């Protein structure tokens, strides 16, 4: 590892924001909440910046994501996962996809109110809303602001189905709400586990929970009858691709009902950030890893084609998919992740409207 490696962060610098020229022309009062031109490197501390969106539930239009609606209490993520596709979205707020994504966290304190207004809407039909489709809803900021917990209370109040994606054990703080939600089949949890090696985890995901704690989280949730799907994603050739069978076995033994995976793709600014990170952390095999990733995406680090972009193609990608099929037969035979209950919300809603 290079001597100038910035410990505790994934990205090692701020990549250029492709909207830089646009933001440099904006008014100073807006820039107070957004990107500041010529900003010098700080002391590597995280900043929490309040924002006030007008809506919180997002319709997911991508056909290969596997969710219809999502909501994100936070933008940016202190976990610092170097491969994270959400990094690119930080540029829309005027920040860099690099260190800014990890150190400037935008806080949507009005998210519970906006969610309740959505669920009270006469035109809303029950569909699972996922916390979060972009950044981790249980990242360190949640310990301070408790926005995710407040949103779960809203889902429980309206008997509305909700999914969770996280790699943080902070989810166990809300076990009381999760138990109540699971009684009516309203909750499904996705726990991300990308490696069984702590050395790999610390490099890939520097501010996340340890692997042992994540596996224990799966165990505790499963013991409380809360359905868990393990996200073994992304699979990165040359870094964690050799672990797929072991990962599947580990999460199965802890009670996960299913698992899913993606083949890493480095879209937008992530390609440059990942390449820089890789050459600093694993210089001896950086070129090999990059070439293997390229072999899964037609000779490039990214593929934007729906249905293929997250699966990859070619010999190496096929090997990964074949291992996945073996893992499902060997460790998940007879297990299924349940569909969430939409009916109770409709009953609740009809009862409320009868009052008027």
Image: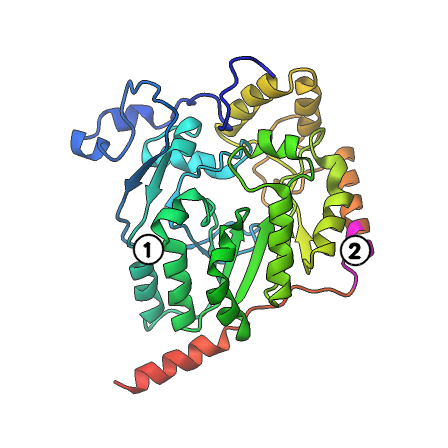
336 sits to left or right of 267: right
Q: Which residues are magenta?
A: 327-333
Picture coordinates of residue 6, whole percent (x, y): 49, 21
- Asked whether residue 175 is drawn in magenta, I would say no
The answer to whether 65 is drawn above or below residue 287 in the figure is: below
Whole-angstrom CA distance, mark 2 to mark 1, is: 39 Å
Query: Which corner quadrant holds the C terminus?
Result: bottom left
Query: Which corner quadrant holds the N terminus?
Result: top right
User: Is most of the magenta stretch helix, strand or loop?
Assistant: helix
- Crowding at dot 2, Cα within 10 Å, few <14 / some 14-19 / many 20+, comes out as some
Residue for badge 2? 331
Residue for badge 1? 111
The answer to whether 87 is drawn above or below residue 68 in the figure is: above
Picture coordinates of residue 342, whole percent (x, y): 50, 73
Check residue 199 in the rendering and tell me which mark sits there, or answer none: none
How many badges with numbers are in the image? 2
In the image, 354 versus 156, the foreground residue is 156
At mark 1, the secondary structure is: helix
- Asked whether residue 328 is drawn in magenta, I would say yes
Say which label, 2 or 1, has the lower sequence index: 1
Q: Quadrant of residue 241?
A: top right
Picture coordinates of residue 107, whole percent (x, y): 32, 45
In the image, 218 versus 107, the foreground residue is 218
113 sits to left or right of 221: left
- Is any part of residue 307 visible from this angle? no
Residue sitting at x 43%, y 82%: 347
Residue sitting at x 65%, y 50%: 215
């Amino acid at each position: 590892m290079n001597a100038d490696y910035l410990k505790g962060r994934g990205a090692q610098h701020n990549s250029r924001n492709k909207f830089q020229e646009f933001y440099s022309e904006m008014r100073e009062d807006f820039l107070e909440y957004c990107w500041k031109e010529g900003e010098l490197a700080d002391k590597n501390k995280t900043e929490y910046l309040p924002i006030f969106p007008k809506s919180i539930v997002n319709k997911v239009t991508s056909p290969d994501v596997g969710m219809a609606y999502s909501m994100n209490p936070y933008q940016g993520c202190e976990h610092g996962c170097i491969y994270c596709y959400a990094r690119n979205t930080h540029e829309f707020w005027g920040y860099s996809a690099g260190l800014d994504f990890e150190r400037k966290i935008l806080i949507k304190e009005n998210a519970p109110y906006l969610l309740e207004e959505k669920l009270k809407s006469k035109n809303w039909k029950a569909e699972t809303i996922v916390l979060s489709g972009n950044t981790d809803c249980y990242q360190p900021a949640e310990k301070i602001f408790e926005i995710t917990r407040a949103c779960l209370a809203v889902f429980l109040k309206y008997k509305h189905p909700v999914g969770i994606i996280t790699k943080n054990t902070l989810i166990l703080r809300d076990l009381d709400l999760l138990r109540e939600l699971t009684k009516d089949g309203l909750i499904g949890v996705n726990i991300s586990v990308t490696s069984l090696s702590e050395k790999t985890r610390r490099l890939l995901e520097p501010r996340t929970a340890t692997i042992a704690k994540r596996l224990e989280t799966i165990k505790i949730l499963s013991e409380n009858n809360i359905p868990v799907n393990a996200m073994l994603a992304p699979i990165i050739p040359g870094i964690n691709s050799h672990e797929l069978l072991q990962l599947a076995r580990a999460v199965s033994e802890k009670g996960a009902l299913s698992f899913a995976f993606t083949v890493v793709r480095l879209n937008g600014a992530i390609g440059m950030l990942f390449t820089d990170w890789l050459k600093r952390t694993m210089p001896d095999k950086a070129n090999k890893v990059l070439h293997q990733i390229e072999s899964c995406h037609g000779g490039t680090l990214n593929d934007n084609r729906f249905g293929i972009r997250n699966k990859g193609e070619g010999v190496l990608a096929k090997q990964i998919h074949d291992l996945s099929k073996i893992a499902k037969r060997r460790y998940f035979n007879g297990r299924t992740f349940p569909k969430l209950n939409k009916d109770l919300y409709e009953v609740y809603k009809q009862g409320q409207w009868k009052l008027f």
